[in-house]
Structures are given as structure tokens and as C-alpha cells.
């Protein structure tokens, strides 16, 4: 196992390096730079501005300089927000995005998984159909519609909650709910489908025949086997949601990383694009490693490390 | 684990060299040896037979067919065009003249929703095909082969996950210009990653189960193992992932169009109509409601059909 | 009358009007003031920087103008009035300004604000190593442009040109400024952020981090920053060291940094903010009907650029025909609905002409009329008799709901009014920076564009179209036009200047129709009725120095 993890960590570093390189090439390939503006400055002045940020160096040198910084955990200064660094953005934004993300994921699992189990046990009964309807609306009405609707109803009409911004627990409720809808629907559908698969299998039938109560059967066998796809889905989801989602952060004016990231692309804020991409990439690789290790615990027959014949 | 290492052998002649004509065939022809299915009804025929019995699934199918028909013929039947503006009639609420009201340029919302179906349904279909053809296969191979191959294949997925999509999209737009085809390309680049991970996870678990062992023992090759045994048994999560990823694709199209990759205005998809309407959600709610309702209805239909398909394709439920 | 006398009279007049305004604005009894003198304003974006020399956007300006004070401040009628400078003299050739600074002007840490602070700050803004993108606001100073364009690595040259720059503190309270050419709007510019003083010791101590933390941020305006929660809010309190603190009624400012317009609107409607000027287009109709919208003039023109070297728009007759075939009133009344005016010339209204009380736009008048028949005739003259055979072309615009709506409307109008088959009038949307690069590379046929004035003078609109001008995306080049602009720039006689600009505009629009003007901008505000005494100028600036919250 240790050997496997070592192998995976090595692969992760290689992947991270490729990710950085591809992103570096892409962002320099697209039109516009950090200082492209509607009002053009004289060329000599533009050269001076670019020199200030070493954008006049050859690309390979900028690339090497950047990698040198990354190795020292220095993601560089932002080109857009003067006097601030990408490390500042992560230090400030990540705790916010992560807090909102963790609450949303807990919320979506706490509701989605039981709902999925119930609809599987009551397949094609009204409980199943109602949850299906809710789940479908949850995925088909996107957050850019749900979020303003929530805000309109609960902040403007009913005045129960503050409309936006970050700081108090009351400001967490609406964004957490809006953010939780899609994973909630996904969890419940995945859970239902896996449960149906498992329930029809012989060992469950055997267990039931042995006289175990339905609930016990469900818990002891079915759920444990049905969580595989949930765990698979959870890996990238945690990485994505904890590093921030643009639409929710934008609409609810939450100072998270998701907004910062989209701005950085819009502004061609090179260091921020790269820094946040690396941060997200590393998180994602880590989560997927954790997922694979969990596979082994869930089902000891799984040998992700491969076999020696 | 001994049996398994035998089964895992790529070489079917595991019992050592035997002269080729030492035995005479008495059973089925050698090329039919692997066929463990009943010849009269194929897997797919059987699935279709069972699907037809599922009332909700068939409703879903009919609704989808109806929507496709409406997308093709609907815009000709409303008496309006999707582009014809009457600026003085802008933002009118639904009425007899305009069943779905008008948009901010006084265009008939019904006609625009019907026309938008063409784009959005095609996006949904393309996204599904990509999910199945690329995602399921890629994930399946990765999970089945396992080991170092799996590590490399899955790290590629992680890298693509990590690359900022907006950069790719802008580059695509600059290089190829705008148009529906380019949307398909953009979706093709990314809309299979989630599926690949799900299928790979399922295959990892399934390939250690008894029925796979059995299939291997009778000499099913890797390809057959994957397509006939592993993927069908992972159909549940596949269908769920598929049906849940379609609306994401439909809304991604709206975002791609906003950046400049999509179809040129005044053509508009459901996603574009909904996202343009949302700015006036309080004043002109119908501009958001109808395209969003169209998407929801379609998804509902897809889901009923998807659930029916899952049951129909489940090998364990075959009778 | 000598210039000096005029200057003094002007100062007195301004002081008087201020005093009077002060009487009218400042409630007689404290009873009219609300207890809580806190103003909550959504500025609409996280500021990119609070360093005045590096600022480029309206949100930054509107945060800066509360914390800083230049030689002058600008009132709600675009008139500069005494700020740190108590009074000033202008030489008879209009080239030399002598500013007399008030002795009681102080930084927020108690240091006096001196002429040397200004000299140092202006030189810093022009220093090529600073990397200011708005340094061109200082190019009017003798040697400014040359200094700014020196290679940033050439330190000896920078020092030499910096010493020779036309700005000199002759003593602690006198600043002498020499200009390149007569610039009637220079006084107004001294209220602009790039020309604010910065606190030298602070800047040198904290280098590029100096403007990021309230605890180390030293400013000289009516308010000082106490807290900056990134992407959320900037808090300011009234500065005790400000020389005119007794005339600043507000005790506290909460400047929200919310960039989503609909969220900003919800905040305002639910009473979380008092003031916002980012109003979503689709809600304007409702807000207007509910009496919640305040629409103010704004110095800007929205237009469609023609690439004058690309077929078919290389022919002025074609450009004129297309400009004449747009129904602007429909666009302003049905799509935008906030009372902005259709544009039939390039320079927007709101800029004074030479004669007192006259507006440049009113004097110049319109340069064309909408007339579909005449347009068709022009096209026929240009050789396009059968419009079905008109070459297909593309309109580019950047991603935004309102740009898209206008582009779709114009597409339909050109197609319908001129009889061009619909598929030949193509629309192409581009992401903002891609669109900027496309325009800069002149790689378009028709492009949506807009221009917001930097200062209150027709020149801010006119000089962009000179041959090879940095912002001249149309590739337009006309020696006669260039010459008129040059005349206007060099002349000390206001009459000659204005006439040259009128003549130039006639060539630009009336003769050559280089761009098709669509409408003149307005700015939309959401104001609670109890917010009083705001000074909002037409280039987007708002000043809270004299604002107060009325009892409500």
C-alpha cells in the first residue's frame, strides 16, 4: 500500500506539472494580457508597465521563474490587484469557500442519501416519484435562477434573511441551500440506483430470508455496497466545491476563491490563474487518491494497486 | 487468488500446449463458445421488450419525441419568427397573441423557446453520446486494465478536470470562430470526465465479483468482458450520471454562447433564454419561467426514460 | 482684466457659492440630521488598488475621492473648487499655474500637506517605474509625456527628466506648474485621482504594499479608511485632521464592494444600502414606475465604429446610409428606457461652449438625420442598387446583455430598413479582452463601442480620431481633421479652440461618418430620499464631503 501511495503521489506531481504547463501555454495563447484596456496607453509606456511585472522576459524564462516560485510555495503577486499576492487570495478566500462548501456537502448528503434509500425501498411508489420530481427540478433549474429566487423571497419579501455578503450564520443559509441542490439531487439519485442494484442481489435476498429485518439488511449490506458511486462522485465534488463556485459566490457576494478565479481569467491575471489552478489541481489529485484508498476499505476485494501475477 | 490469476491470463490456452486436432468439437462452433446468451432474443431486443412494458419510461420517450417534433415543426406553426422584433411590444406578459409573452425586443417567446429546443436538445443528445462513447468506455478500460495504466489514464482525467475551461473555450473561439459545432467540440473535451470516474469506480468493484470471474473462466476476452458484463452491470450509476449531466451541458452551452463560442444571435437556446431572462426575474418572470420549464420537463422525461432503461438493461432482471 | 484677478474672483465666487450651498445644505438645526450619520454606498467592485497613481476605474476613483483631496475638488456641476489649494494664479499665456496651498491642510497622521508632497507624487505618477496607466492625465505638464515614455531601466535619464519636469514646489505652500500648451480644463484635472498627493514616507516605507492596509494608510481627505474586508466592504470614518472637518456632516462611510447588479439592487431595496449606481437594465422600467430611479447626465457616447479601410465601409456614403437607417428612439425608449438621448453627433451634451451658458452640443447641433429613403439613395450612389447583393458583413460586440440587445435591434433595423438579407448582417460576440484585441488590430467591419470622457472638454472625445491615435480603432486618417485638432490643442484663444473642434466634429460625423453615434449615456442611481448633499459629477464621480443623512 505504501508503495502504491508513493507511486500515486509521484504521478500527482507529474500531473500537476503538466497541468501548470498546459495552463501556462493556454493563457499566453489567448488574446489579451493583464494590461489590455479599453483606453490604450502609448507603446513605450506599455513596455514599461510590462517590464515592471517581467512580462517582457522571454516566455520560457517567465515559465521557469514561475515554477521556481511554486517550488518555494510563492505563487507570485497579482497583476490585477496591486500589492496583493495569490497567496493572500488563497489565505483569505479558501476558508470562506471551504466553510460554505463543507456545509453544503453535509447538507446535501444528510438529505440526499436517506432520500435515495427511501425511494429505493419504495421503488415506484409515491415517495419515489415525489423525490424524483424534486431531484429533477434540483438539477434542471440552475443556481443562477435558484439563487436570485431565494434572495427575492427570503431577503426581500419575507425579510427573514440578509440578502448577501458573508460573516454571520444567517448569511450562510441561502448560499448553502442553493449550492447543495445539485449534489443533493445527485446523491439521492445515485443512492437510489445503487440500492436497487444491491437489493436485487442474492446475498441481500439471503439475508432477508434469514429473517433479518428490512432496516438491518439495508444498513448492514446494501448501504455499504451502494456508497461506491457516491464516494467516486464525492472526490472531485469536494475539490470543486471547497475551492469555490463562481455563480453562488457572485450572486451572494461571498469573498471566496471561485469568484477570484473567474475574475483572474477575465482579467488575464496570469499569476492568479496559474496559482488557483495549481491549488485546485493539487486538491483534486489528493481527493481522488483518498477516494481510491477508501475503495479498498469499502470493498477489500478491490485492488487498485494492480496485481502481481 | 490463484484462480483469478488464471482467469486474468490473456492467453486462453492456460492448460498448456494441446495438439490442435486432438479433440473433436461436439458443442457449439468454436466462435460461438463465448456466447452465453440465449440466441433467439438478443440483449437489446430483450431490453426493448421490457422497456415497452414500463409505462412511465414510455411516457418519457413519447415526450422526448414530441419535443423533437415541436423543435422541428413548432417554429413554423406559431405565426411568428424567432427573430422578428416588434420593439414597441417588448416585455409583454403572456396573452392570447403571445402564449409565452414576449422578450425584451418584442419577439414571441413561444417561438423562441421552440426554436431553442433545436439547439438545446441537440446539446443534450451530443452530451449523452460523448458521455457514453467516451466517458463510459474510457473509465471502463481504465478500471478493467488497472494498475499503472489506470494511474496514467486517471491522472489524464484529473489534468483535464484541472485546466480552466474558460481558457480552452476562448482559444477555441479564436481559432475556430463561433458555431454549434464548436460547442460540441468544447463539450467533447470535458463532458465525459465525471462519467469516466464513475464507470472506472464501478468496474474496479465489479471485476472482482463472481460473475466476472465466471465469464473469464469461459474465456471471454477483455472487450467482451467490458461491453457485455461490466458496463451493463454498472448501468445504474451510468444512467444517473448521464441524466444528471445533461442539464449541466445545456447550461454550459449558455455560458459558452455568452463568451462567444455558441450560435450567433438572434438564435438562442433554452440556456441562453433562461440566463438572459434571469436579469429581469422580478419584472418579467415568464422570460425565465418558460425556458426553465422546458428544460425541467425534458429532464423529467429523460429521467423516466433513463430509469426505465436502467431496469431494462439490468442483466440481473432478465427473465 | 488680468488672469490673476479672474482667478481670485473665481475663488471668491466658488467660496461664496459653497458657503451659500453650505447654508442651504447644512440643516439649520441639528434636529434635521439623523442621529446615525452613516452613509452606506455600494461602489460596485472590489478596488484593484487604492494607490491613486495606479487607479483606472470609476469604483476606485469613488473610493479614493472620499479619502483624498487634490489641489481642487469637483462639485456636482463639474466645477473645480478650492481643495488643498486655497487659491491659484494663472499666467496670461495660460501656461503657468501657481497654486497657493492652505496651511492647515493635514495628513491623517497629522503631518502637514505641502507643495513638496504634490511635486513628489506627480513625479512618481509619471515615473516609468511606477507603471501608471492613467499617467497621461499628467501629460499636459511640461515634459510629462517624455518622462513617462523613458525606458524604465534608464535611471539617469529618469532622474534628469524628472528634475526638468514642469512642476516645482517653490516653498512648502506654493506649487508652480508649467504646461506644454494652454489647457483650459487643467484646473479640473487637479481634482483627478492621478493628481492626488500621496504620503511619501508611507509609500517609501511599505513599497507596493502601502495602499493595502488601513492601519498604515495615510490620506488627506475628509474621510479615512478604518477597515477593508476584501470583496465585502471598506469602512471609513470622518478624518479629524481634515482641514474642513467642521463642514463634513457624515461620521461614517460603509462602502460596499458588491459587483452583482441584481444583488446590489436587492441590498438597496431591502434597506441594506442607501446608495448604488449599478442598476440592472431589465429592472429599470419597474424602478422608474415605482419612483425609485434617479437618472443623471453622464459624459459619454455609445456608438458603432466602422472600419474605414475595409469594404464595404470604406465608402463614406455607405457609412452615412447605415447611420441613417438606425431608429435610435426605439432603442433608447424601448430597450434602455431610462431617458437617455439618441445621438446624432459625437460629443455628448453637458460640455460648456465658449459663450457662457451655452452647451457645446447645442451650438454644434446634429450632423445627420434618420432617413431611410435618403439612405437607400446614398447606397445606390455608392453602387449598391440591389441590396440583395450587398456584401455580407459582421458586427462585433462584447459579452453583455445590453450590448447584445442593441446589436440584435440594429441588425434587424439594417436588414429591414435597407433590404439587406438577414443572413448577410452577422452578429459576433467576443469575450471582453478578445474583443479589445480585435478592435486594436482593426480586425472588424463594424464594432460596438463607447467612450466616456476623462475630463469636461470636447477634446476628450475628439482627439481619439487623429491619424494613428492610440484609441483610433477605425483606422480613420484625415489631414484636415488632424490639423483642426492640432489647432485646438495649441491655441490659447478659447474661441478659436472651440471653433476648431466644431469644425473637426463636422468632418468626423457630418462628412465622413467615421462612427455611427447611437446614444448619449446617462448614469442611473438608486438613492434613498434621506441622502442629501451629494456632489455627483458627469464623469462618474461622487463626493460625500458635504453629504448628510436627513432625519427619517
Image (cartoon, grey):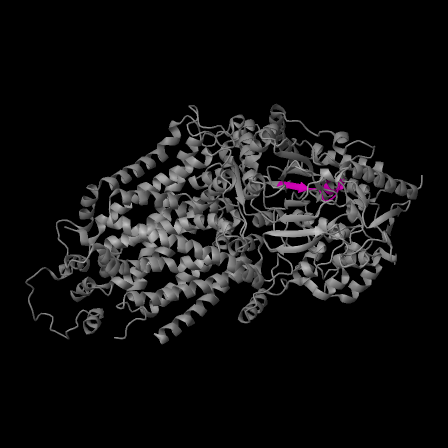
Q: Exactly how many numbered labels are in the figure? A: 0
Q: Quarter-wise, where is residue B286 in the image?
A: top left
Magenta segment: does it hold C450? yes
- Region in magenta: C449-461
The quarter of the image holding the C terminus of chain C is top right
Q: Where is residue C240 in the image (x, y as percent from the top left)?
A: 76, 53
Residue B165 lies left or right of residue C47; in this view the side is: left
- What is the x, y in percent for residue B172? 48, 51
Out of A78 and C101, give the one closest to the viewer: C101
In the rendered view, tell whether residue C357 sits above or below residue C181: above
* Whether residue B226 is visible: no
The residue depicted at 22 percent of the width and 52 percent of the height is: B314
**Quadrant of the rendered image containing residue C369:** top right
Is residue A193 visible to the viewer in this orientation of the structure? yes
Q: In this view, does C444 lie above or below B84?
A: below
Residue B133 falls within the magenta-colored stretch: no
Give left or right: position of C230 versus C150.
left
Left or right of A20? Residue C19 is right
Residue C73, image x, y percentages: 78, 46
Indicate the quadrant containing the N terminus of chain C: top left, top right, bottom left or bottom right.
Answer: top right
Toward the viewer: B76 or A287?
A: A287
Which of B28/C373 is in front? B28
Residue A52, position in %: x, y?
67, 62
Residue positioned 28% across, 48% down in the render:
A119
Amino acid at each position: 500500500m505504501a508503495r502504491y501511495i508513493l507511486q500515486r503521489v509521484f504521478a500527482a506531481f507529474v500531473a500537476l506539472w503538466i497541468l501548470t504547463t498546459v495552463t501556462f501555454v493556454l493563457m499566453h495563447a489567448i488574446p489579451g494580457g493583464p494590461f489590455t484596456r479599453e483606453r490604450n496607453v502609448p507603446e513605450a509606456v506599455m513596455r514599461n508597465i510590462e517590464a515592471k511585472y517581467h512580462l517582457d522576459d522571454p516566455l520560457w524564462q517567465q515559465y521557469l521563474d514561475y515554477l521556481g516560485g511554486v517550488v518555494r510555495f510563492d505563487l507570485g503577486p497579482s497583476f490585477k490587484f496591486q500589492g496583493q499576492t495569490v497567496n493572500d487570495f488563497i489565505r483569505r478566500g479558501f476558508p470562506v469557500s471551504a466553510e460554505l462548501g463543507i456545509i453544503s456537502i453535509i447538507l446535501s448528503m444528510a438529505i440526499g442519501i436517506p432520500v435515495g434509500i427511501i425511494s429505493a425501498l419504495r421503488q415506484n411508489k409515491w415517495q419515489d416519484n415525489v423525490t424524483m420530481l424534486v431531484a429533477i427540478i434540483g438539477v434542471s433549474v440552475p443556481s443562477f435562477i435558484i439563487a436570485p429566487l431565494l434572495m427575492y423571497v427570503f431577503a426581500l419579501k419575507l425579510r427573514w434573511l440578509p440578502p448577501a455578503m458573508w460573516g454571520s450564520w444567517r448569511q450562510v443559509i441561502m448560499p448553502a441551500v442553493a449550492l447543495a441542490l445539485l449534489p443533493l439531487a445527485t446523491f439521492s439519485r445515485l443512492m437510489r440506483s445503487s440500492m436497487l442494484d444491491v437489493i436485487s442481489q442474492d446475498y441481500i435476498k439471503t439475508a432477508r430470508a434469514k429473517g433479518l429485518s428490512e432496516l438491518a439488511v439495508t444498513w448492514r449490506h446494501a448501504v455499504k455496497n451502494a456508497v461506491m458511486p457516491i464516494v467516486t462522485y464525492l472526490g472531485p465534488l469536494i475539490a470543486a466545491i471547497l475551492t469555490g463556485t463562481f455563480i453562488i459566490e457572485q450572486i451572494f457576494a461571498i469573498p471566496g476563491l471561485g469568484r477570484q478565479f473567474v475574475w483572474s481569467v477575465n482579467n488575464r491575471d496570469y499569476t492568479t490563474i496559474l496559482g488557483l489552478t495549481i491549488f485546485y489541481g493539487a486538491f483534486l489529485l489528493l481527493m481522488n487518491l483518498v477516494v481510491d484508498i477508501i475503495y479498498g476499505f469499502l470493498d477489500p476485494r478491490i485492488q487498485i494497486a494492480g496485481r502481481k501475477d | 487468488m490463484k484462480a483469478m490469476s488464471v482467469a486474468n491470463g490473456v492467453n486462453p490456452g492456460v492448460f498448456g500446449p494441446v495438439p490442435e486436432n486432438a479433440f473433436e468439437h461436439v458443442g457449439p462452433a468454436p466462435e460461438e463458445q463465448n456466447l452465453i446468451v440465449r440466441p433467439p432474443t438478443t440483449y437489446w431486443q430483450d431490453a426493448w421488450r421490457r422497456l415497452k412494458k414500463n409505462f412511465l419510461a414510455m411516457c418519457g420517450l413519447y415526450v422526448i419525441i414530441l419535443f423533437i417534433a415541436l423543435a422541428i415543426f413548432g417554429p413554423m406553426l406559431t405565426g411568428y419568427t424567432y427573430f422578428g422584433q416588434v420593439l414597441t411590444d417588448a416585455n409583454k406578459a403572456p396573452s392570447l397573441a403571445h402564449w409565452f409573452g414576449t422578450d425584451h425586443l418584442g419577439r414571441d417567446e413561444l417561438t423562441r423557446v421552440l426554436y431553442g429546443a433545436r439547439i438545446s436538445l441537440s446539446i443534450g443528445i451530443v452530451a449523452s453520446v460523448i458521455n457514453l462513447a467516451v466517458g463510459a468506455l474510457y473509465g471502463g478500460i481504465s478500471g478493467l486494465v488497472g494498475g499503472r495504466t489506470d494511474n496514467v489514464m486517471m491522472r489524464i482525467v484529473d489534468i483535464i478536470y484541472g485546466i480552466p475551461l474558460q481558457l480552452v473555450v476562448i482559444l477555441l473561439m479564436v481559432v475556430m470562430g463561433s458555431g454549434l459545432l464548436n460547442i460540441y467540440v468544447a463539450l467533447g473535451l470535458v463532458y465525459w470526465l465525471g462519467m469516466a470516474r464513475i464507470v472506472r469506480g464501478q468496474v474496479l468493484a465489479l471485476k472482482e465479483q463472481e460473475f466476472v470471474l465466471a465469464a473469464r473462466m469461459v474465456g471471454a476476452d477483455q472487450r467482451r468482458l467490458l461491453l457485455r458484463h461490466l458496463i451493463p452491470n454498472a448501468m445504474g450509476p451510468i444512467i444517473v450520471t448521464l441524466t444528471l449531466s445533461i442539464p449541466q451541458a445545456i447550461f454550459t452551452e449558455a455560458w459558452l454562447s455568452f463568451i462567444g463560442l455558441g450560435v450567433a444571435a438572434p438564435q438562442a437556446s433554452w440556456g441562453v433564454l433562461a440566463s438572459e431572462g434571469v436579469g429581469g426575474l422580478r419584472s418579467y418572470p415568464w422570460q425565465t419561467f418558460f425556458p426553465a420549464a422546458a428544460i425541467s420537463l425534458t429532464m423529467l422525461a429523460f429521467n423516466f426514460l433513463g430509469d426505465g432503461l436502467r431496469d431494462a438493461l439490468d442483466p440481473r432482471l432478465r427473465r | 482684466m488680468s488672469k490673476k484677478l479672474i482667478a481670485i474672483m473665481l475663488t471668491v465666487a466658488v467660496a461664496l457659492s459653497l458657503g451659500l450651498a453650505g447654508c442651504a445644505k447644512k440643516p439649520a438645526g441639528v434636529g434635521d440630521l439623523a442621529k446615525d450619520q452613516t452613509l452606506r454606498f455600494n461602489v460596485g467592485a472590489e478596488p484593484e488598488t487604492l494607490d491613486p497613481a495606479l487607479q483606472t476605474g470609476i469604483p476606485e476613483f469613488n473610493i479614493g475621492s472620499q479619502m483624498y483631496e487634490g489641489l481642487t475638488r469637483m462639485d456636482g456641476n463639474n466645477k473645480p473648487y478650492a481643495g488643498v489649494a486655497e487659491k491659484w494664479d494663472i499666467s496670461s499665456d495660460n501656461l503657468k499655474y501657481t497654486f497657493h496651498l492652505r496651511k492647515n491642510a493635514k495628513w491623517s497622521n497629522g503631518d502637514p500637506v505641502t507643495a513638496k508632497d504634490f511635486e513628489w507624487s506627480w513625479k512618481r505618477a509619471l515615473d516609468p517605474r511606477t507603471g501608471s496607466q492613467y499617467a497621461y492625465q499628467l501629460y499636459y505638464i511640461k515634459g510629462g509625456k517624455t518622462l513617462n515614455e523613458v525606458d524604465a531601466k534608464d535611471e539617469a535619464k529618469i532622474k534628469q527628466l524628472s528634475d526638468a519636469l514642469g512642476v516645482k514646489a517653490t516653498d512648502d505652500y506654493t506649487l508652480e506648474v508649467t504646461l506644454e500648451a494652454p489647457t483650459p480644463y487643467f484646473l479640473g484635472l487637479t481634482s483627478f485621482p492621478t493628481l492626488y498627493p500621496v504620503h511619501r514616507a508611507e509609500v517609501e516605507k511599505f513599497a507596493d504594499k502601502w495602499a493595502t492596509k488601513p492601519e498604515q494608510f495615510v490620506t488627506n481627505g475628509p474621510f479615512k479608511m478604518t477597515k477593508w474586508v476584501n470583496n465585502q466592504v471598506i469602512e471609513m470614518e470622518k478624518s479629524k485632521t481634515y482641514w474642513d472637518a467642521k463642514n463634513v456632516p457624515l461620521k461614517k462611510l460603509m462602502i460596499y464592494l458588491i459587483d452583482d447588479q441584481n444583488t446590489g439592487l436587492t441590498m438597496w431595496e431591502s434597506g441594506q444600502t442607501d446608495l448604488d449606481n449599478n442598476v440592472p437594465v431589465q429592472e429599470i422600467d419597474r424602478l422608474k414606475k415605482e419612483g425609485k430611479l434617479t437618472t443623471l447626465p453622464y459624459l459619454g457616447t455609445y456608438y458603432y465604429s466602422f472600419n474605414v479601410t475595409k469594404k464595404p465601409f470604406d465608402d463614406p456614403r455607405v457609412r452615412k446610409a447605415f447611420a441613417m437607417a438606425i431608429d435610435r428612439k426605439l432603442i433608447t425608449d424601448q430597450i434602455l428606457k431610462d431617458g437617455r438621448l439618441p445621438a446624432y453627433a459625437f460629443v455628448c451634451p453637458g460640455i460648456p461652449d465658449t459663450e457662457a451658458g451655452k452647451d457645446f452640443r447645442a451650438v454644434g447641433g446634429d450632423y445627420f438625420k434618420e432617413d431611410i429613403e435618403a439612405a437607400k439613395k446614398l447606397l445606390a450612389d455608392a453602387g449598391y442598387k440591389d441590396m440583395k447583393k450587398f456584401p455580407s458583413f459582421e458586427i462585433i460586440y462584447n459579452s453583455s446583455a445590453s450590448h447584445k440587445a442593441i446589436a440584435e435591434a440594429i441588425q434587424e433595423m439594417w436588414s429591414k430598413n435597407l433590404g439587406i438579407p438577414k443572413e448577410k448582417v452577422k452578429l459576433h460576440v467576443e469575450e471582453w479582452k478578445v474583443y479589445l484585441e480585435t478592435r486594436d488590430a482593426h480586425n472588424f467591419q463594424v464594432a460596438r463601442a463607447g467612450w466616456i470622457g476623462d475630463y469636461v472638454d470636447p477634446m476628450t472625445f475628439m482627439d481619439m480620431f487623429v491619424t494613428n491615435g492610440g484609441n483610433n480603432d477605425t483606422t480613420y486618417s484625415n489631414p484636415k481633421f488632424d490639423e483642426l485638432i492640432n489647432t485646438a490643442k495649441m491655441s490659447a484663444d478659447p474661441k478659436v479652440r472651440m471653433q476648431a473642434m466644431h469644425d473637426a466634429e463636422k468632418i468626423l460625423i457630418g462628412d465622413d461618418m467615421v462612427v455611427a453615434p447611437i446614444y448619449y449615456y446617462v448614469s442611473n442611481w438608486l438613492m434613498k430620499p434621506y441622502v442629501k448633499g451629494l456632489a455627483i459629477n458627469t464623469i462618474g464621480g461622487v463626493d460625500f464631503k458635504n453629504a448628510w443623512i436627513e432625519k427619517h
